[in-house]
Amino acid sequence: MPRGLRAALSAYQVETAHQRGWAALTNGDLLAAADAAGFDAMITADRNIRYQQNLAGRRIALIELTTSHWETIRDNIADLLAAIELATPGNDAAVSLPRPPKRRRPYERLC
């Protein structure tokens, strides 16, 4: 997730997988580690994680964003905040954000 997200969620205690030394963990192991550490929710942009991981019996909620594009998340932060407030243990929520603008290469004129 983008670095700016931490500042945008300053009302919450936010830690990254990298800060915890979990950067090398795969989805299942990362989710298990966060659950065991007592985190309330995990935010991810992995759109397949909810199909790959079973949340039954877990105390952690999973919040899935449809993009990791910082400007799009920042401009729609209210949607993420609402999902965080509604998150319940062992459930997942998808936050649908608009598609980020496409990056275009400068036009090169061929002579």
Image (cartoon, helix red, strand yellow):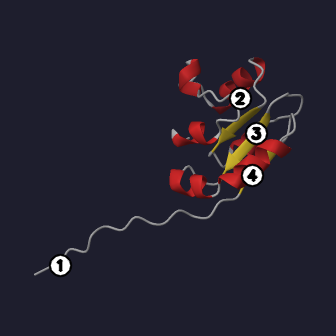
Q: Is residue 42 above or below residue 74?
A: above
Toward the left, the furthest residue is 111
Q: Residue at x 59, y 53 (%)?
A: 73
Query: Residue 45: which disc?
Result: none
* Viewer-nearest residue: 79 or 67: 79
Residue, disc 3: 62
Mark 3, other Cα within 10 Å: few <14 / some 14–19 / many ≥20:
many
Q: Locate the C terminus and report the quarter of the image it occupies.
A: bottom left
User: Farthest front residue?
Assistant: 11
The residue that mark 2 highlights is 31
Mark 3–mark 1 distance (CA, rounded to whole Å):
47 Å
Q: Earlier in the sequence, mark 3 or mark 2?
A: 2
**Which mark is on residue 109?**
1
Q: Secondary structure at mark 3?
A: strand
Please tell me which residue is depicted at 68% across the width and 28% down the height of the picture. Answer: 13
Tell me the amino acid under the disc marked 1: Arg
Q: Is residue 103 placed above or below 58 in the rendered structure? A: below
Q: Earlier in the sequence, mark 3 or mark 1?
A: 3
Front disc: 4 or 2: 4
Residues tagged 3 and 2 counted as in contact (Cβ below 8 A): yes
- State the CA–CA distance, disc 2 to disc 1: 49 Å
Q: Amino acid at mark 3?
A: Leu
Crowdedness near tag 4: few (<14), some (14–19) or many (≥20) residues, C-alpha within 10 Å: some
Residue 95 visible in image:
yes
The image quarter containing residue 15 is top right
The amino acid pointed to by label 2 is Leu
Query: Where's residue 14, x and y in %?
Result: 65, 30
Q: Residue at x 27, y 70 (%)?
A: 106
Q: Which mark is residue 94?
A: 4
